[in-house]
Image: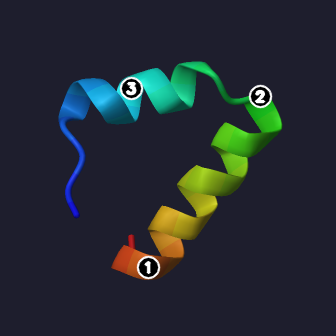
Amino acid sequence: MSLSREEVLDAIADMSVMDVVQLVEAMEEKFGV
């Protein structure tokens, strides 16, 4: 299942700052950034 860029942005807009920070950290781990 893939989300459109707009759907992802809407989901992030509904998150708290801490949720976004954790999301970024999880993405860095997953993609080795």
Amino acid type of disc 1?
Answer: Lys
Residue 17: quadrant of the picture: top right
Nearest to viewer (mark 1 / mark 2): 2
Image side of residue 32 versus residue 28, left or right:
left
Residue 20, given in percent of the width and then of the height, sits at: 65, 39
Residue that appears at 44% across and 79% down: 30
| Element at label 3 | helix
Q: Name the residue under label 2.
A: 16
Residue 1: quadrant of the picture: bottom left
Sequence-first tag of 1 and 3: 3
Query: In the rendered picture of this protein, how many numbered marks are placed on residues?
Result: 3
| Element at label 2 | loop
Residue that appears at 39% across and 70% down: 33
In the rendered view, tell whether residue 32 sits above or below residue 6. below
Sequence-first tag of 1 and 2: 2
Nearest to viewer (mark 1 / mark 3): 3
Residue at the outermost front position: 1
Amino acid type of disc 2?
Answer: Ser
In the rendered view, tell whether residue 3 sits above or below residue 29. above
Amino acid type of disc 3?
Answer: Leu
Give the label on residue 9, or none.
3
Crowding near pointer 1: few (<14 within 10 Å), some, many (20+)?
Answer: few
Compute the Cα span from label 2 to label 3.
13 Å
Q: Mark 1 points at which residue?
A: 30
